[in-house]
Image (cartoon, rainbow, N blue to C red):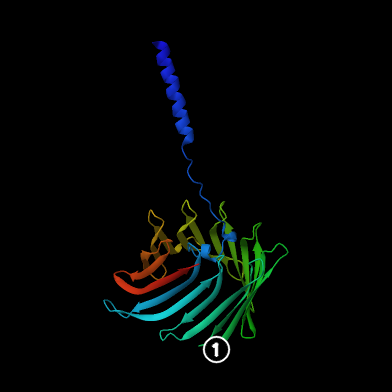
Amino acid sequence: MQKNKLLFILLFLFFFLISFSCKRKPAEIVITPDALKNHLQNARLYGNVKNIETSTYYYASKDSSCFFFSKTIQCFSSDGYLTQVIIFDKNNDTVSLKKIYYLPNVQENYWEEVNFIEKTKTKDTFLYDKNGFKKEEWLMVNDSILYKIQYKTDGIGGIIEMKRLLHEYYLTNKIYYNDKGLVERIEEYDPNLKIYKYFTIEYDNYGVEVNRRAFKANNDIIEYTYTQYNNDGLLVKVIFEDRLHNYREDRIYIQHDTHKNWLEEVVMQGDDTLKRRVRQIEYY
């Protein structure tokens, strides 16, 4: 009798261990460092997006109907990089056309933008070091150099310092990353290399930005952006608060497609609706 009891206990332990070992391990969360993301990933767009058409509507006053203001079309390559941006005005006339050109290794070579209203042509050219990391950028408007930017990068190409060279002075930004390779702090310096503003960025367990704060050098908070997702990973709300000007704006996302990209955004200030953006997304 005692032997049977002992055998029963041993069999119970055996099957318990077998069932425990057969349980699936939770899926590992893979977070892509910012330096290795394509444009779709940086913009938090999901799926193999081909183009996005975004129409913006404004409300003239409280309880009034909205009116069409502008439309933007963004085109992406099959590997997730922006190739073209076209902006139209309320009359559907073309305001500007921007085209982005790449090197064979998918590094951005330069982009050109023609503004048909202002009669200007802008060209932004990028230079790289021997490791293929960004080292310099030249922005020209018509035939004049507006500014240059010099970059310092880390071991995977993440930008850790930007120095914007203007005609009489330069401005510096320093960027810091967390252990996942995501930007967690940005510092802005004046021409005397004295910090005057900095940002902190927080993420959820999936590497998605949820909190962004801006501070003065004395650590007083001046701006705050809170991003909220539901349990299905859908973007539902973004709250932006400018404490210097006592301004708050709520962006509410009320429609999404099957890829979890939002299709309609409503921008509120208090109880007033300011504008609405509607997106149509085409996939490869």
Q: Is residue 105 shown to the viewer in this render?
A: yes
Note whether 180 is above or below 212 in the view shown: above
Residue 170 position, x and y percent, is: 63, 73
- Compared to residue 143, the image places residue 166 above or below, namely above
Amino acid type of the residue tagged 1 in the rendering? Lys
Query: Residue at image x 52%, y 62%?
Result: 41
Quarter assignment of residue 32: bottom right
Expressed as whole percent of the image width and height from the top left, the position of residue 194 reads 59, 66
- Say which of 111 and 148 sits in front: 111
Image vertical order of residue 18 relative to residue 132, above or below: above
Which structural element holds mark 1?
Answer: loop
Residue drawn at x 57%, y 86% is 120
Residue 200: % across, % down: 50, 59
Q: Which residue is label 1 attached to?
A: 119
Binning the other alpha carbons within 10 Å of mark 1 as few (below 14), some (14 to 19) or many (20 upward) gives few
Left/right placement of residue 247 relative to residue 192 reads left
